[in-house]
Amino acid sequence: MKIKPLRDDLLEYILKHHLQKKWDKSVRLFEINIRHPSLNTEILEPHWRGIYSFRLDSKYRALFFITPQGEAEVFQITNHYK
């Protein structure tokens, strides 16, 4: 599954938190296999909202939804433990 290009604020977040290499690796894995074990992709509660997440590392996660065109659109990157 393809990931849509990130918004500028998300790109800034990745650079600010030194996540560029981790982001690139996660995107490669995601586009090959959305269910790759190291991504730990999951649907978040409540399920009816259709919001998913995948892991960048043990601390950061990317939240996304699937567009009607069948692409993943990341709308937030978060510190999972804050």
Image (tube, helix red, strand yellow):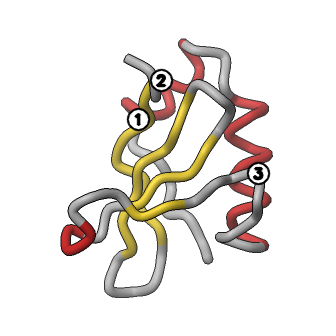
Say if mark 1 contacts mark 2, CB within 8 Å.
yes
Total labels drawn: 3
How many angstroms separate mark 1 from mark 3 (CA)? 26 Å
- Where is residue 56 shown, x and y percent of the image? 65, 38
- Where is residue 63 shown, x and y percent of the image? 41, 49
Residue at point 68%, 33% (across, down): 57
Find numbered disc 2 in the image and state the secondary structure of the residue it sits on.
Answer: helix
How many angstroms separate mark 1 from mark 2 (CA)? 6 Å
- Where is residue 54 shown, x and y percent of the image? 56, 51
- Where is residue 60 shown, x and y percent of the image? 55, 30
Q: In the rendered view, does 4 fall on the left or right side of 46? A: right
Q: Earlier in the sequence, mark 1 or mark 3?
A: 1
Give the residue at mark 1: 8
The amino acid at mark 3 is Ser
Residue at point 27%, 58% (across, down): 45
Give the residue at mark 3: 38
Locate the C terminus by quadrant: top left
Q: In the rendered view, does 59 fall on the left or right side of 48? A: right
How many angstroms separate mark 2 from mark 3 (CA)? 24 Å
Give the residue at mark 2: 12
Residue at point 39%, 43% (across, down): 7
Mark 3 nearby-residue class (10 Å; few <14, some 14–19, many ≥20)? some
The amino acid at mark 1 is Asp
Residue at point 41%, 64% (across, down): 43
Q: In the rendered view, does 78 fall on the left or right side of 5? A: left
Q: Is 15 or 54 nearer to us in this picture?
A: 54
Q: Quadrant of residue 20?
A: top right
The amino acid at mark 2 is Glu
